[in-house]
Amino acid sequence: MNNNSHQSERGGIAFNITLIMLLIVIGILAYMLIAERQNPTGRNIGNNAPQIQTPPKHAQNVRESDNGVFNDGLGHATASTEYPLDDVGAGLARRDMFRYDINNDGRMDRITRSRTETGTSHFSYEYKIELNTENGFVDITPPGFNTVEGAECSLQKIRFTFEPTFQAIKISRPWQETWITPTPATRDVYDIKNNMIELIDSRPMPTVCDVAELF
């Protein structure tokens, strides 16, 4: 009788030890599962994964913007101001300011685009490029950095690119006989070197009426 009692007692102790060990194992597994879900090692899970960034629109070398108007590559303006025109609809109409670090010195430089109306179907954009220096903004705009545009054709247009580096492309053609008379165009490419914008390439282009077709 005593032997049976001792055997039962030993069996109960063994069962309890086995149950405790099983509970410990379950607890360890549950902790590991919770820790994995909390992502302690930095592994990206689901929506926490980093999103791939697409280039901003101004960095994409597209021919036209969404509304079918020529894209000069500057993107959305940091600030814009509209001005009243005179009685015939002429004068400075709008000024847009853009901020980019064009010489990679850590300072945000400034590009200003001003639209001037003539009271006719012709108008122009003038660009001003300024470097942000320790002594303030310095104008480094090359001569002739403006567009010559009309309802039918454009004689000169400019596009800016910022990836992988800053460049400005100007395509122009001379006026001859009438505004819409096609003439041979020229493509000039500008780059920034030693904090100055320099012409690095110039080549002839086909004969056209609207130079926007050549971008």
Image (cartoon, helix red, strand yellow):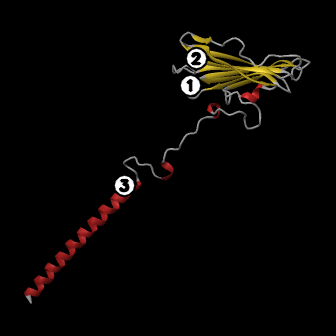
Can you give x and y, in whole percent of width and height, for residue 167 in the image?
Answer: 61, 22
Q: Nearer the viewer, mark 1 or mark 3?
A: 1
Q: Nearer the viewer, residue 175 or 88?
A: 175
Furthest residue to the left? 2
Crowding around mark 3 (Cα neighbors within 10 Å: few <14, some 14 to 19, many 20+) is few
Decide which of tag 1 and tag 3 comes sooner along the chain: 3
Q: In the image, what residue occupies the spot 49% across and 44% down?
A: 50
Figure quadrant of residue 53: top right
Residue topped by disc 3: 35
Residue at disc 3, secondary structure: helix
Can you give x and y, in whole percent of width and height, for residue 56 in the image?
Answer: 61, 34
The quadrant of the rendering that contains the C terminus is top right
Can you give x and y, in whole percent of width and height, for residue 14 in the image?
Answer: 17, 75
Disc tally is 3
Crowding around mark 2 (Cα neighbors within 10 Å: few <14, some 14 to 19, many 20+) is some
Q: Are marks 2 and 3 in contact (CB under 8 Å)?
A: no
Residue at disc 2, secondary structure: strand
Figure quadrant of residue 13: bottom left
* Residue 33 in the figure: left or right of residue 73: left
Q: Nearer the viewer, mark 2 or mark 3?
A: 2
* Residue 113 in the figure: left or right of residue 197: right
The quadrant of the rendering that contains the N terminus is bottom left
Furthest residue to the top? 135
* Residue 47 in the figure: left or right of residue 131: left
Amino acid type, mark 2: Ile
Residue topped by disc 1: 165
Regarding residue 211, the answer to whether it shows in the image is yes
Rounded to the nearest angstrom, the CA distance separating label 1 from label 3 is 45 Å
Amino acid type, mark 3: Ala
Regarding residue 114, the answer to whether it shows in the image is no
Rounded to the nearest angstrom, the CA distance separating label 1 from label 2 is 9 Å
Residue topped by disc 2: 192
